[in-house]
Amino acid sequence: MVQYLDPPLDLSFAALSDATRRGIIDQLGRGDASITSLADNFQMTLTGMKKHVQVLERAGLVVTQKVGRVRTCKLGKRGLKAEAEWIEAHRKLFEARFEALDEIISEMKQEGSDDSAS
């Protein structure tokens, strides 16, 4: 089987595959937050939240900064442009295939109605 390697996409999609991490992205979209406040909001241990944030950091979706004892998280500057383009290209591919399937089904229905009319 051929493997397509695109590490940035792989890291992003892996990071976004988890509902908690998507929730973290949503929350950080409204403003920066400490790991402690994120853990509280998601009713999670600090250790668990740190692991989620590390996954998001590796993907470049989140950056953290430690000031004193507080580690603050904010959205990374990388964004999701490449991921959105990949999704859009595949959406168009699926849409074209479904349209072709609709045409085949319509033709089959037409042939079926022509056969019963004879």
Image: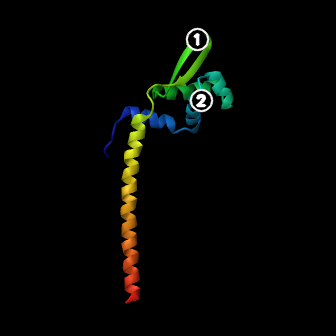
Q: Residue 19, position in %: x, y?
A: 57, 39
The image quarter in which residue 41 lies = top right
35 on left or right of 79? right
Q: Residue 7, position in %: x, y?
A: 38, 32
The answer to whether residue 4 is above or below residue 28 is: below
Res 23 seen here = yes
Which is closer to the viewer, label 2 or label 1? 2
- Please state which amino acid type lies under the numbered disc 1: Val
The image quarter in which residue 70 lies = top right
The answer to whether residue 90 is above or below residue 97 is: above
| Residue closer to the observer: 74 or 38 | 74
Task: Classify mark 2: helix, strand or loop.
Answer: loop
The answer to whether residue 95 is above or below residue 85 is: below
Rendered-image quadrant of the C terminus = bottom left
Distance, label 2 to label 1, CA atoms, is 21 Å
Q: Residue 4, position in %: x, y?
A: 33, 40
- How dense is the environment of label 2, judged by Cα within 10 Å: few (below 14), some, or many (20 and up)? few
Q: Residue at x 56, y 22 (%)?
A: 73
The image quarter in which residue 98 lies = bottom left
Res 45 seen here = no
Task: Classify mark 1: helix, strand or loop.
Answer: strand
Q: Residue at x 38, y 75 (%)?
A: 108
Q: Residue at x 57, y 34 (%)?
A: 26
52 on left or right of 7? right
Q: Residue at x 40, y 65 (%)?
A: 102
Q: Which residue matches tag 1? A: 67
Q: Which residue matches tag 2? A: 30
| Mark toward the start of the polypeptide (2 vs 1) | 2
Q: Residue 20, position in %: x, y?
A: 59, 35
- How dense is the environment of label 1, judged by Cα within 10 Å: few (below 14), some, or many (20 and up)? few
